[in-house]
Amino acid sequence: MDKDQKSIEAEADFPWHLGVFDAHCHPTDTISSMDVIPTMKVRALVIMASRAQDQEIVAKFADAYGVRSLAMSDLLEVGATSVVPSFGWHPWFSYQIYDDSLVLPTDSPNGSSKLDHYKSVIVPSPDDPEFLSGLPNPRSLSAYIAETRSYLVKYPFALVGEIGIDRTFRIPQPDAPSASHSEGLTPGGRDGKRLTPYRVDMDHQKKIFKAQLNLAGELSRPVSVHGVGAHGTLFEVLRESWQGYERPILSRRARKRASAAQSHVNSDENESEKEELDTDKKKPFPPRICLHSYSGPQATLKQYLHPSIPSTIFFSFSSLVNLAAPSSSASRPVSTKAIDVIKAVPDDRILVESDLHCAGERMEGLLEHVVKVVCQTKNWPLEKGVRQLASNWVHFVAGQAESIHAE
């Protein structure tokens, strides 16, 4: 263990009381951990949906523990951990959706149509009868979007996610009809299944991703985005969504004039008013985007931070994906790539997450670890860093409208 890592692990009492927030996690994968949530030290969890089996479960978590206000003072006063639901279809499972704009309403994918659908969106095109027969009947994109829209309307603080693009993921063997889930895991996930040689066609992934970005824009909801092995493609899809809505780039002289004219107005109030105006009209892109467990290179940050981009982009980091997660026996050195990226992310655009499938002490341990790494990397005193990360979380989830309350 190197000196810096030792100092991270040996940090004094962790200031949970200041408010620590998880920007991305999956405790719905382990339903048995649901009852632990209100006893946790973290203030709020953004809980992701990813596939057919967990959309309703996320809603149940929100019904039980859903956040009632996104004002920081209210979040800190609540005596139990709150939940912010997020509804989305993960790229790993995008092959289970078919684009019904390409077929007649009567031509739903079952029987031969089901096989045709899977052969068209899985690469290489599968010819294994056992594999194909084990796949579920796909659902239509329009039905999924309609269902998600209804969830977003019902839960006014809900996000869209987890959505995105993944070039490297391989489809696991489908569940056997008699598959057991006695461990309390939600069906339909990877669950240690053997991986097949098949992947999801990139054009199909982009189509499902774009539809969800459009929905988030329509309802002015932030999104949590998965991007693996396709950083260039991911950015291109996002750029297409906001094309034609770019912010004008003022000259230095024009910026000085605008700054002088607005010098009597608080800059945070300016941004708040600007975001409120931006939500007056429906747009095909989300107002705020979190690139979760961001694994892109430092050089890629510049394109996401360009002042013409009309969405506010956040970058989230996790111990599980970006850092060497702490273990009970030893700690490995923190990734130097992650450190370089964290240093380069603006202070007000960084988030932390657990990305864990189970609520409880391990989730909190992972959050504590990544918060300490971020604070040390940014040269923030721990308490200052916790406050900054909390403020960033509220900005991502709620925008600048911190005083809004659920009905």
Image: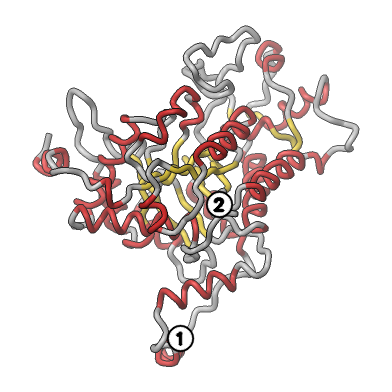
Check disc 1 and report its element: helix, strand or loop.
Answer: loop
Identify the mark nearer the N-term, 1 or 2: 2
Q: Amino acid at mark 1?
A: Ser
Name the one closer to the observer, 375 or 1.
Answer: 375
- Whether residue 42 is visible to the viewer of this picture, yes or no, is yes
Tell me: residue 192, above or below residue 122.
Answer: above
- In the picture of the structure, the residue carrying the numbered disc 1 is 251
Q: Position of residue 137 (x, y in %)?
A: 74, 24
Name the one closer to the observer, 47 or 339.
Answer: 47
How packed is label 1: few (under 14 Cα within 10 Å), some, or many (20 or more)? few
Q: Position of residue 392 (x, y in %)?
A: 38, 58
Tell me: residue 332, above or below residue 216.
Answer: above
Label 1 to label 2, Cα distance in Å?
37 Å
Tell me: residue 174, above or below residue 54.
Answer: above
Q: Where residue 182 is drawn, which disc sits there?
A: none
Q: Position of residue 81 (x, y in %)?
A: 40, 41
- In the picture of the structure, the residue carrying the numbered disc 2 is 157
| Quarter of the image that includes the N terminus | top left
Q: Is residue 287 left or right of residue 46?
A: right
How packed is label 2: few (under 14 Cα within 10 Å), some, or many (20 or more)? many
| Quarter of the image that includes the C terminus | bottom right
Check disc 2 and report its element: helix, strand or loop.
Answer: loop
Residue drawn at (68%, 25%), measured in percent from left and top? 125
Q: How is the image coloured?
A: secondary structure
Q: Amino acid at mark 2?
A: Phe
Tell me: residue 346, above or below residue 87.
Answer: below
Residue drawn at (23%, 58%), measured in percent from left and top? 384
Q: Position of residue 305 (x, y in %)?
A: 43, 64
Residue drawn at (65%, 15%), measured in percent from left and top? 131
